[in-house]
Amino acid sequence: MQRTFSIIKPDATKRNITGSINNIIEDSGLRIIAQKRIQLSVSQAKEFYSIHSEKSFFNDLIKYMTSEPVIVQVLEGSEAVLTYRNIMGATDPNQADEGTIRKLHALNVQENSVHGSVSNVNAEKEINFFFKEDEIVG
């Protein structure tokens, strides 16, 4: 079994569609083994998204990610990283495949409802950023 990390972003929590997104996740065969609702601080968001710090959209990203609560999750399943990336869909919802989370729920490229790890290495880092091991029940 493999683990990956997910964030249900502010646009989705504000619209109260967390349950719908969780249904898509679970219907794909992934298990949600840890989940919590948090309000990201500016410093947390800046640290988490530091890879984008030099990009023009960075300040808007931080403002957006701290605008409403988010749901952070640990997902588990066979090929969890790839499976979740496939069900999220393309970053741009206009390019996302039918039935993916972003095609169904995203408002635009930034407000695209979910974040998911890009690799196993990133998944481990992202999980450890938000969760202690005793918070994950697999």
Image: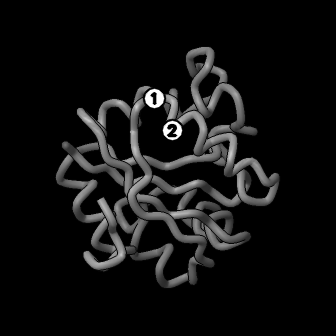
Task: Return the residue at label 2.
Answer: 25
72 left or right of 16?
A: left
- Looking at the rendered structure, the secondary structure element under dot 1 is loop
Q: Which residue is mark 1?
A: 28
How far apart marks 2 and 1 lie (CA) works out to: 5 Å
Kind of residue indicated by mark 1? Ser
Quadrant in which the N terminus is drawn: top left
Q: Are marks 2 and 1 in contact (CB under 8 Å)?
A: yes
Depth order, front residue of 29/79: 29
Which picture quadrant has residue 20?
A: top right
In the displayed structure image, the side of residue 72 where residue 81 appears, left or right? left
Few, some or many C-alpha atoms within 10 Å of disc 1 (few <14, some 14-19, many ≥20)? some
- Residue 53: percent from the left, percent from the top? 42, 66
121, above or below 44, in the image: above
Mark number displayed over residue 134: none
The quadrant of the picture occupied by the C terminus is: bottom left
Amino acid on which the number 2 mark rests in the picture: Ile
Q: Residue 47 versus residue 12: which sits nearer the camera?
A: 12
